[in-house]
Amino acid sequence: MADFYDLLGVSRDVDADTLKRAYRRLARQYHPDINKDPGAEDTFKEIGRAYEVLSDPQSRARYDQFGEAGLGGAAGMPDMGDMGGFADLFETFFSGFGGAPGGGGPRRRGPRQGDDLRLDLTISFQEAVFGAEKEVQIRHLETCSACQGSGAKAGSGPTTCGTCGGAGQVRRATRTPFGSFTQVAACPTCEGSGQVIADPCAACGGQGLQQVRKKLRINIPAGVDSGTRLRVANEGNAGQRGGPAGDLYVFLSVQPHGQLRRDGIHIHSEVTLNYLQAILGDMIEVETVDGHQQLEIPAGTQPGAVLTLQGKGVPKLGNPVARGNHLFTVKVQLPTRLNDQERELLEQLAGHHTSRGQKHPHKSGLFGGLFGHRD
Ligand SMILES: [Zn+2]
Ligand SMILES: [Zn+2]
């Protein structure tokens, strides 16, 4: 399926008026009554579908963000409650973004809350650990500046709906086998608002909303991880007819690190020792999120042993004073080639170990010196 903007031959920031003109021109060109080319009817339908989506600010915003996938059914965002603050934290990842029910479009009755929006943001390993301030660019719907959201052309205003006389409701008598009932329904002309716009604002096509690009600074707290969701209140789409704006949800994903691996608040990595370091012990330099640190290798460290640097892990989300640990899994590398001198020394050691080690297991050579008592 072609891009709706391409299909209509308009740019992505096209205003409502230009969009309408582009649609009308193409609709005339491809109308099956006029255009007998094979495929003209399909093109005509596609143009109609594209215009239907792009002419409604809410569905256009969803299309901009999610493509056609954003136009399907699915309920709106569940209400997560406002915890206050600039960016609230939600650690659970959930699906079910979508927006208003598909099909005939939203029913409008009085104020309508703006859609929540989703922004996916990738941050580095280090930024996730220590937090960061990121500048992002979003597109969302704001109240139209030309008509201040009224949807009416400057100088004009909404007028009282003639169908319902401004009540927003119409009464209908329904006959049933049990008698006649009067049903109250939302007025089909004004969709319940009691007012109609005779002369719509050209900038927003009467919707009272316009697509705006905006730069935002997002404060990412220390200790976030892939799947952490931040809420930025009121930066979703603007509401209509005085309704509140939706929220912007920032979904984080963290880039993997070359050497370090996250496990909650702890960090894992490997250190490779040569066999002498493992046997004799050493002080080595290791990479941590705090830069290079010294790690003590105790004498007699075994392959697979885990050494810990306390407090060099990830700050706890919401309580950054508390930090996890950095855990180092030890690998020991044995030499594949020995020079003559090394071989001589090792053979000496081996001979010493087997000939005397059998008889005096607690008093033998180098190993005795390391792990027992020297003669
Ligand atoms: Zn407007
Ligand atoms: Zn009405």
Image: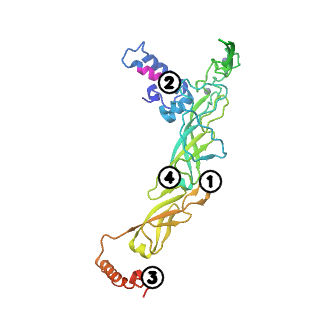
For label 2, the residue is: 51
> Which callout, 1 or 4, points to the residue nearer the camera?
1
User: Closer to the observer: label 1 or label 3?
Assistant: 3
Q: How is the image coloured?
A: rainbow
Vertical side of 96 occupied by 258: above or below? below
Residue in the foreground of this view, choosing between 318 and 111: 318
Disc 3 versus disc 4: distance between alpha carbons?
48 Å
**Element type at marker 3?**
loop
Q: Chief secondary structure of the magenta span?
A: helix
Asked which quadrant contains residue 172, the reply is top right
Label 4 Cα crowd, 10 Å radius (few <14 / some 14-19 / many 20+): some
Tell me the CA gap for discs 1 and 4: 19 Å
Quarter that holds the C terminus: bottom left
Foreground tag (3 vs 4): 3
Q: Amino acid at mark 2?
A: Tyr
Residue 231 seen from this side: yes
Residue under numbered circle 4: 124
**Which region shows up in magenta?**
42-51
Q: Is residue 45 magenta?
A: yes
- The residue where tag 3 is placed is 372
Which dot, 3 or 2, sits closer to the camera? 3
Instruction: Say what amino acid the circle numbered 4 marks.
Output: Ser
- Front-most of residues 79 and 21: 79
